[in-house]
Image (tube, rainbow, N blue to C red):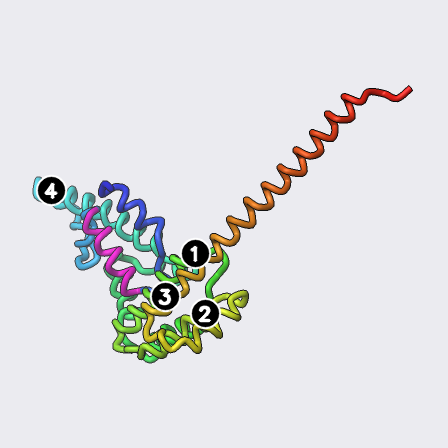
């Protein structure tokens, strides 16, 4: 995969929501470094005073080149945020101010952020649009975010939250997983969930092909019956 493709994927990928700051920070840092915009998150530059000297023209050229990249850096930050957050940060005059503001709001371990991360983890529910692989990836990322802010969930807590987050159609499987003494940690429960998802997919595929074969058989019988009627011909 080329750098351009990586950058495109980052722009289309998971945007800042307020609870995924740590991984977002790493991705956006990589993105801005590759685009040579990162320095604009740590420095500012003011327009040089009016003048007609050669030095003034050189300073103005440097400032204009810096300003062009600065606008790109600022736009990149905003485009990698969730829509709900854009309005809260677009007022920042510089990319550096925006970067610092985001770090202050989401990069620390404030009580509000801790509560937000814990609540998101405890209330998470698998959505129908997410495959089981995506679901497990999201759960794993949330556990990692909690560890990053020094909230180490016990293996039992992780298992219980995963079981609770499974869809309502998995009520029987939730009971089985709850009372399975062989499930000790997140890896164990993820493995069982993945196997169950594969089993369900195989069952659906078998039922689909069986139904298709049944329809084909009925069509074949009707076709043969029609041929038999044609052979007998009209009765006198």
Tell me, yes or no, whether the highlighted magenta stretch contains residue 223: no
Q: Position of residue 119 (x, y in %)?
A: 41, 75
The CA span between labels 2 and 4 is: 60 Å
Whichever of labels 1 and 2 marks the residue nearer the N terminus, that label is 2
Whichever of labels 1 and 4 marks the residue nearer the N terminus, that label is 4
Which residue bears the numbered disc 2?
165
Residue at 57% x, 46% y is: 210
Residue at 49% x, 74% y is: 175
Whichever of labels 3 and 1 marks the residue nearer the N terminus, that label is 3
Which residue bears the numbered disc 1?
198
Q: Is residue 112 left or right of residue 217?
A: left
Instruction: Assess disc 2: are there few (<14), some (14-19) or many (≥20) residues with their C-alpha within 10 Å of its C-alpha.
Output: some
Whichever of labels 3 and 2 marks the residue nearer the N terminus, that label is 2
Query: What secondary structure is found at the residue carrying circle 2?
Result: helix
Query: What secondary structure is found at the residue carrying circle 1?
Result: helix
Which residue bears the numbered disc 3?
190
Query: What secondary structure is found at the residue carrying circle 4?
Result: helix
Residue nearest the observer in this picture, 192 or 232: 232
């Amino acid at each position: 995969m080329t750098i351009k493709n990586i950058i495109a994927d980052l722009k289309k990928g998971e945007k800042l929501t307020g609870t995924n700051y740590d991984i977002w920070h790493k991705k956006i840092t990589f993105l801005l470094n590759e685009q040579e915009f990162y320095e604009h998150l740590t420095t500012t530059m003011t327009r040089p005073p009016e003048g007609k000297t050669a030095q003034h023209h050189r300073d103005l050229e440097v400032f204009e080149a810096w300003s062009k990249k600065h606008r790109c850096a600022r736009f990149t930050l905003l485009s990698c945020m969730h829509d709900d957050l854009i309005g809260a940060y677009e007022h920042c005059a510089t990319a550096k101010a925006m970067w610092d503001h985001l770090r202050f709001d989401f990069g620390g371990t404030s009580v509000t952020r801790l509560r937000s991360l814990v609540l998101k983890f405890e209330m998470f529910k698998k959505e129908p649009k997410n495959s089981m692989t995506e679901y497990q990836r999201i759960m794993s990322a949330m556990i990692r975010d909690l560890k990053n802010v020094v909230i180490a969930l016990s293996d039992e807590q992780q298992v219980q939250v995963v079981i609770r987050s499974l869809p309502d159609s998995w009520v029987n499987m939730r009971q089985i997983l709850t009372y399975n003494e062989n499930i000790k940690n997140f890896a164990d429960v993820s493995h069982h969930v993945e196997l169950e998802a594969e089993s369900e997919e195989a069952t659906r595929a078998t039922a689909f092909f069986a139904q298709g074969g049944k329809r084909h058989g009925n069509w074949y019988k009707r076709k043969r019956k029609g041929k038999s009627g044609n052979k007998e011909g009209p009765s006198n």
